[in-house]
Amino acid sequence: MTELEKLEKQIIACRKCPRLVEWREEVARVKRKAYMDQEYWGKPVPGFGDPKARVMVVGLAPGAHGSNRTGRQFTGDASGKFLYPALHKAGFANQPQSESRGDGLVLNDMYITASGRCAPPDNKPSTEELNTCQPYLERELELIDPVVIVCLGRIAFERILKIYSARSSVYKFAHGASYQLANGKWVLCSYHPSQQNTSTKKLTQKMFDAIWEKAKEFANRK
């Protein structure tokens, strides 16, 4: 078993945050009407992708009826429906859709993970819960050792700054903003591909496509 596989097992077995454990399991029992015939994952969701990836994507946390149902990051919800076509277009994914863990999706030169691993009520994990989850993200960063970290949303960006002890007074979140940290890693900011952002056109497909082209450019600089 590889170190990444060991970490995945640890993440899936985690029960450190009582509020999140109760919520994710309740959602998995009650289900949404459209998915009543499906078995929900209902556990923490590990990262996945290319173990030799130069690009790591960090999101917020699993959606209650998306990743909490399917068991894979950005899979089975509106965010994933916006994300994966863009990754396929940029050459990071072998197909433009992600519906289930067994759908044949393969990531190339990319690893996708999140700041929090359990679906939180109202999509809002607490700072304490994110702090509890942070060692998992730190370990993934050690094992993958990416050249570029794409932060989908402000919370993911601030979490990466905290891990690398980078001063938030120097690095500011804005869509398309990019920074090279003292350790040489590139951090690239994007609005989160949530339905709230995409339906209002705060995040357009053109804006999102530009992020992945920039990620490739930074990865190729090393």
Image (cartoon, rainbow, N blue to C red):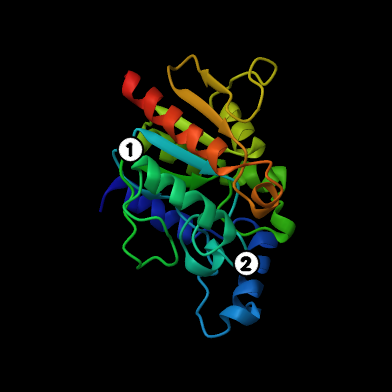
Nearer to the camera, 128 or 59: 59
Furthest residue to the front?
206
Furthest residue to the left?
1
Task: Name above or below for residue 85 compared with residue 32.
Answer: above
Q: How crowded is mark 2: few (under 14 residues within 10 Å), some or many (20 or more)?
A: many
Nearer to the camera, 123 or 97: 97
Q: Name the kind of residue labelled 2 in the image.
A: Arg
At horizontal 58% and vertical 84% (from top left) the residue drawn is 36
Drawn side of residue 18 relative to residue 58, left or right: right
Nearer to the camera, 108 or 17: 108
Q: Mark 2 points at which residue?
A: 24
Q: Do the residues labelled 2 and 1 touch (CB within 8 Å)?
A: no
Nearer to the camera, 184 or 55: 55
Tell me the distance, in whole angstroms, between the alpha carbons under discs 2 and 1. 29 Å
- Image depth: mark 2 or mark 1 in front: 1
Callout count = 2
- Where's the C terminus, which quadrant? top left
Drawn side of residue 88 relative to residue 153, left or right: left
Q: Name the residue under label 1.
A: 53
At horizontal 53% and vertical 65% (from top left) the residue drawn is 43
